[in-house]
C-alpha cells in the first residue's frame, strides 16, 4: 500500500512540476510579445470579435456578476472561511497552507502589476479601474482559489466521479471569470492568459511543496 501511495504521488508531483514549467514558459512568451515587442493585434482582434458578435446587454449583466466571484473583496473572505473551517477542525497545517497560498498569490500579482506597469484597455464596460492591467489579478487569484478548492476536494473521500465533476465545474468557472474580464474590456486577452499562467505556476508550486513535505513526514513515520 505504501509503495502504491508513493508511486501515485510521484506521478502527481511530476505533473505539477511539468505544469509549473509550462506555465512559466508560456508567461515568458506572452510577456515578450505584448510588452517587449508591443504586439497587441491579437488583443485588438479579440475585442473586435466580442463587440461585433458576442456583446449584449443581458450577457454584460451576467458577466458583471461572474467577474465579482474573484474580486478583491470576495476572495479574501472566501480564503478566510476556508482557513477558519480548518482551524475549527484543528487541522493547523492545512489552515496555514491555505493562508500561505492565498497571501502568496496576492503578493505575486500585486508586485507583477507594479513591475510591468501596463495600462488598462480603453472603453471598459464597467467603471474604469485605476491599477495596472498585466497580468490579470482576477484570472490569477481566481484560478488559485478555485484550483485550490479542486485540490482540497481531491484530498477528501468523495467517490472519484464526484471529484472529477467538481473539478471540472470549478476549473471551467475560473476560466469563465477570466473570460468575463476580457468581455468587460477591463483586461486584454493576453493579460488574462498571463494571469492564468501565474495562477497555475503558483498553485502547482504550492501543492508540490505541500505534498513533498507530507511525503517526507510519512517516510519518517514509516
Image (spheres, rainbow, N blue to C red):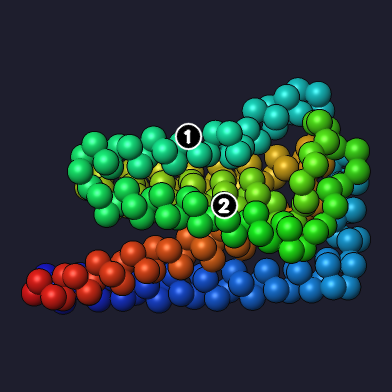
The answer to which of marks 2 and 1 sits earlier in the sequence is: 1
Lateral position of residue 14 relative to residue 107, left or right = left
Q: Which residue is mark 1?
A: 77
Lateral position of residue 48 relative to residue 219, left or right = right
Q: How many marks?
A: 2
Q: Which residue is mark 2?
A: 106
Residue 12 position, x and y percent, is 36, 70
Q: Quadrant of the C terminus?
A: bottom left
Q: How far is the residue under mark 2 from the one under mark 1?
A: 13 Å
Q: Which residue shows up at 39% across the image and 35% down it? A: 81
Q: Which residue shows up at 73% across the image and 24% down it? A: 61
Lateral position of residue 163 relative to residue 54, left or right = left
Mark 2 falls on what kind of element?
helix
On screen, 21 above or below 107?
below
Q: Which residue shows up at 79% across the image and 39% down it? A: 129
Residue 168 position, x and y percent, is 47, 47
Q: Which residue shows up at 64% across the image and 75% down it? A: 25
Lateral position of residue 177 relative to residue 16, left or right = right
On screen, 17 above or below 97?
below
Query: Is residue 178 in view from this perspective?
Result: yes
Q: Kindly indicate the quadrant of the structure image that contains residue 118.
A: bottom right
> Which sits in the foreground, 221 or 15?
221
Mark 1 falls on what kind of element?
helix
> Which sits in the foreground, 98 or 197?
98
Query: Is residue 195 in view from this perspective?
Result: no
Amino acid at each position: 500500500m505504501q509503495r502504491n501511495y508513493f508511486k501515485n504521488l510521484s506521478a502527481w508531483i511530476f505533473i505539477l512540476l511539468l505544469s509549473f514549467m509550462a506555465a512559466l514558459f508560456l508567461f515568458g512568451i506572452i510577456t515578450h510579445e505584448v510588452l517587449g515587442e508591443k504586439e497587441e493585434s491579437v488583443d485588438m482582434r479579440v475585442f473586435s470579435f466580442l463587440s461585433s458578435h458576442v456583446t449584449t446587454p443581458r450577457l454584460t449583466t451576467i458577466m458583471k456578476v461572474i467577474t465579482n466571484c474573484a474580486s478583491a473583496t470576495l476572495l479574501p473572505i472566501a480564503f478566510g472561511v476556508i482557513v477558519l473551517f480548518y482551524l475549527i477542525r484543528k487541522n493547523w497545517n492545512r489552515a496555514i497552507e491555505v493562508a500561505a497560498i492565498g497571501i502568496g498569490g496576492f503578493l505575486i500579482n500585486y508586485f507583477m502589476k507594479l513591475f510591468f506597469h501596463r495600462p488598462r484597455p480603453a472603453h471598459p464596460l464597467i467603471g474604469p479601474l485605476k491599477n495596472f492591467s498585466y497580468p490579470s489579478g482576477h484570472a490569477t487569484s481566481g484560478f488559485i482559489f478555485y484550483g485550490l478548492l479542486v485540490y482540497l476536494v481531491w484530498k477528501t473521500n468523495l467517490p472519484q466521479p464526484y471529484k472529477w465533476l467538481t473539478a471540472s465545474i470549478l476549473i471551467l468557472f475560473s476560466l469563465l471569470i477570466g473570460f468575463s474580464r476580457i468581455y468587460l474590456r477591463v483586461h486584454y486577452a493576453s493579460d488574462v492568459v498571463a494571469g492564468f499562467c501565474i495562477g497555475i505556476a503558483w498553485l502547482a508550486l504550492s501543492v508540490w511543496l505541500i505534498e513533498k513535505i507530507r511525503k517526507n513526514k510519512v517516510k519518517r513515520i514509516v
